[in-house]
Image (cartoon, rainbow, N blue to C red):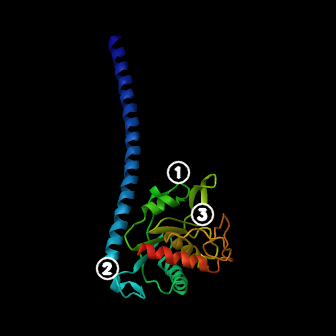
């Protein structure tokens, strides 16, 4: 009888150990999954940085597309296609942006580079994991003296704004050297260059303009491409003053 009781206790102990082992196994699997996600993000970040490094070396001033480039004082505008934006699309946006830039600021010198398409890491998502958090994207983007990085994504971007924890926006330029633009809310993608110009001018220190025809007008939650027709004289002068301080 005692042997049977002892045998039963051993079986219970074995079962308990088995359950504990299974629970630990599940926990380790979850931990490993999180580690894999973090490692994937780190690898993606490193690959993007390495790609940017070699791209800049290979495309240097002699091979990049050059606009009125005659000395080393020019700035370089780097377009980065993110999350589904193709090289053809980014080239089209860049060409329209360049025409607008040249026509309004003919005395300025810029050279242009288009990077290879990239995927943003999961660390750039908002807290709800539903959209890209615009400020996190800008923080992730590279930064370099005399370079202006313009990221363009097809994904929706947002910010805690106007009393909302997740307010959808078209673009963000919180930094002098970089900005992000989303085509998600733009029906006519060919007009994306206007938003790019708007954010680019923010990187030069310009604020929103009260002129309803100016590209620097505040959209206030509404897309107004039909009214974004010009860069007004006031904004042009303000740009020239800001630009001279940066040089």
Tag 1's secondary structure?
Answer: loop
The disc label shown at residue 58, or none? 2
Q: Do the residues labelled 1 and 2 touch (CB within 8 Å)?
A: no
Disc nearest the viewer among 2 and 3: 3
Taking the image as drawn, is residue 116 in sight?
no
Does 13 sit left or right of 235 as displayed? left
- How far is the residue under mark 2 from the one under mark 3? 35 Å
**Measured from the top left, where is residue 139 in percent x and y?**
44, 60
Viewer-side label of 3, 1 = 3
Between disc 3 and disc 1, whose residue precedes? Answer: 1
Q: Nearer the viewer, residue 121 or 211?
A: 211
Q: Residue 52 occupies which quadrant of the picture?
A: bottom left
Q: Is residue 115 above or below residue 99?
A: above
Residue 127 has which mark? Answer: 1
Q: Which of marks 1 and 2 is nearer the N terminus?
A: 2
Comes first in the chain, label 2 or label 3: 2
Crowding at dot 3, Cα within 10 Å, few <14 / some 14-19 / many 20+, comes out as many
In depth, the one of 220 and 117 nearer the eye is 220
Q: Residue at x 60, y 77 (%)?
A: 234
Measuring from the top left, give residue 178's x and y in whole percent: 46, 68
Residue visible at 52% across and 76% down? 239
Marks 3 and 1, how far apart at CA: 16 Å
**Marks 2,3: beta carbons within 8 A:** no
């Amino acid at each position: 009888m005692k042997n049977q009781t002892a045998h039963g206790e051993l079986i219970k102990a074995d079962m308990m150990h088995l359950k504990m082992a299974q629970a630990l196994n599940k926990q380790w699997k979850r931990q490993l999954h999180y580690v894999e996600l973090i490692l994937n993000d780190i690898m993606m970040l490193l690959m993007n940085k390495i790609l940017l490094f070699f791209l800049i070396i290979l495309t240097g001033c002699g091979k990049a597309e050059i606009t009125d480039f005659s000395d080393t004082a020019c700035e370089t505008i780097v377009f980065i296609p993110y999350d589904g934006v193709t090289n053809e699309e980014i080239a089209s946006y860049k060409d329209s942006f360049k025409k607008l830039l040249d026509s309004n600021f003919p005395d300025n010198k810029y050279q242009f580079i288009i990077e290879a398409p990239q995927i943003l890491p999961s660390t750039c998502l908002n807290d709800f994991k539903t959209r890209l958090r615009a400020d996190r994207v800008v923080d992730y983007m590279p930064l370099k003296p005399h370079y202006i990085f313009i990221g363009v994504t097809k994904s929706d971007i947002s910010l805690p704004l106007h009393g909302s924890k997740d307010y959808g926006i078209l673009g963000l330029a919180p930094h002098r050297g970089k900005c992000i633009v989303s085509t998600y809310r733009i029906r006519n993608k060919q007009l994306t260059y206007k938003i790019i110009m708007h954010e680019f001018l923010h990187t030069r220190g310009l604020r929103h303009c009260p002129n309803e025809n100016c590209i620097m007008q505040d959209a206030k939650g509404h897309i107004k491409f039909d009214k974004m027709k010009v860069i007004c004289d006031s904004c042009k002068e303000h740009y020239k003053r800001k630009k001279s301080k940066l040089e």
